[in-house]
């Protein structure tokens, strides 16, 4: 009579096994279907970017790579390089501020050769939807080093008169370096003090906004990539936000408080520019017809063109209210007591 061997006992799963498990994250497929990119992330530690040729099975890997993007022609993979986890943990243990903690970097992998280029301290990167010649990336602020002065010494200001009201000083954070990189040659152009940027879908234009330590340099601009000619869409001290292109890559819109910046509660206006025009025009101002009473253009509402480019959708919000000035009295704090309470609140708190 045939007998079967007893089954081998199953091995218990321990925490050591858990630590060996890896998850697949951020899966991206190239437009032509030839390459697949994903991040292989362990339970603890830095992961790696895996880019696989689906026809041959060949793989290319990049340590700590994530958030992969294929260029439109499928020749390059642009990815984020995560900071070293041990350094991040060390900074958190030292209770460093977020701005002083290790920052992510940027990498570009050429699929044909497997050659990779990386750089450190990158805040964001953007690719044109239908073009592959250039990428643009925004750097983090310059890293502070021991001994650096926080602010340059300024001449002593004239002391205000005792009876003069104190006006709250307007503060506006400057932008950082925007780098435009040509992928084939590695040539780069740097634009200083940029806060936001957007490619047109065809990659022919790059729009960007500037917040400068020198107020007259603030503005919104469009760079024609064919020859590098820059058009000033609107300039002057203020905030410039919410850049948006139409699908035909011929119009751009944005909002700005340039004309009302000096007010205690500045109101934003909607600006519109068509390629070839000398500058942008105000499309919806502070008192435009059709706005709800007490409302104005929202600085936070995303702008969007209709598919045919004939309409532009925007957000509105209640008009901003001036903030409490430095000379305003402090809010009064009171305790409410009802006649039915057995004891007033101070006595309740004491007991």
Image (tube, rainbow, N blue to C red):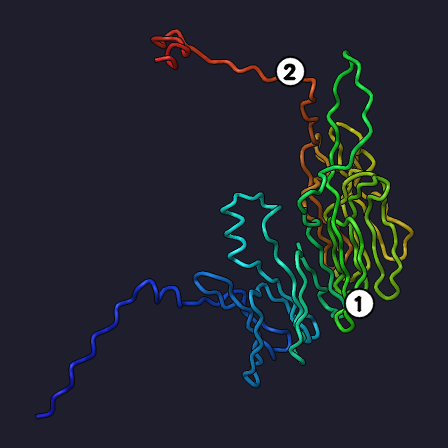
In the rendered image, residue 200, in percent from the top left (x then y), is placed at 76, 61
Report if the CB atoms under discs 2 and 1 are less than 8 Å apart.
no
Give the residue at the far front of this rendering.
Answer: 147
Dot label at residue 187: 1
Q: In percent of the image, x 20 and y 75: which residue is there?
A: 9
Q: Nearer the viewer, mark 2 or mark 1?
A: 1
Query: Which structural element holds mark 1?
Result: loop
**Label 2, on which residue?**
329
Give the residue at the far left of this rendering.
Answer: 1
Residue in the foreground of this view, choosing between 116 and 218: 116
Is 136 situated left or right of 234 in this image? Answer: left
Residue in the foreground of this view, choosing between 18 and 297: 18
Query: Which structural element holds mark 2?
Result: loop
Q: In percent of the image, x 52 and y 43: which residue is there?
A: 95
Q: In percent of the image, x 69 and y 21: which residue is there?
A: 326
Is 57 situated left or right of 296 in this image? Answer: left
Which quadrant holds residue 181?
bottom right
Which quadrant holds residue 14?
bottom left
């Amino acid at each position: 009579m045939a007998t079967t061997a007893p089954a081998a006992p199953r091995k218990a799963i321990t925490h050591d096994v858990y630590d060996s498990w890896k998850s697949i994250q951020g899966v991206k497929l190239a437009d032509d279907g030839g390459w697949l990119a994903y991040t292989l992330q362990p339970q603890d530690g830095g992961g790696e970017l895996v880019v696989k040729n689906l026809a041959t099975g060949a793989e290319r890997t990049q340590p700590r790579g994530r958030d992969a993007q294929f260029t439109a022609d499928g020749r390059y993979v642009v990815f984020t390089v995560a900071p070293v986890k041990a350094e991040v943990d060390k900074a958190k243990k030292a209770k460093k501020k977020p701005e002083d903690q290790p920052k992510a970097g940027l990498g570009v992998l050429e699929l044909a050769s497997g050659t990779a280029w990386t750089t450190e301290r990158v805040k964001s990167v953007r690719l044109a939807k239908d073009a592959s010649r250039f990428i643009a990336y925004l750097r983090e602020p310059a890293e502070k080093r021991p001994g650096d002065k926080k602010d340059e010494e300024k001449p002593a200001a004239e002391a205000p008169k005792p009876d003069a009201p104190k006006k709250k000083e307007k503060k506006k954070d400057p932008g950082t370096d925007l780098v435009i990189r040509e992928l084939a040659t590695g040539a780069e152009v740097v634009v200083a003090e940029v806060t936001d940027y957007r490619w047109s879908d065809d990659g022919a234009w790059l729009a960007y906004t500037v917040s400068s330590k020198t107020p007259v340099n603030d503005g919104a601009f469009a760079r024609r990539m064919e020859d590098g000619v820059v058009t000033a869409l609107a300039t002057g001290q203020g905030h410039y936000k919410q850049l948006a292109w139409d699908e035909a890559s011929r119009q751009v819109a944005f909002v700005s408080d340039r004309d009302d910046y000096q007010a205690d509660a500045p109101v934003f206006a909607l600006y519109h520019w068509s390629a070839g025009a000398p500058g942008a025009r105000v499309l919806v101002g502070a008192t435009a017809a059709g706005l709800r009473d007490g409302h104005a253009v929202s600085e936070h509402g995303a702008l969007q063109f209709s598919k045919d480019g004939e309409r532009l959708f925007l957000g509105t919000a209640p008009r901003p209210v001036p903030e409490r000035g430095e000379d305003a009295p402090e809010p009064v704090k009171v305790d409410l007591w009802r006649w039915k309470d057995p004891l007033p609140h101070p006595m309740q708190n004491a007991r």
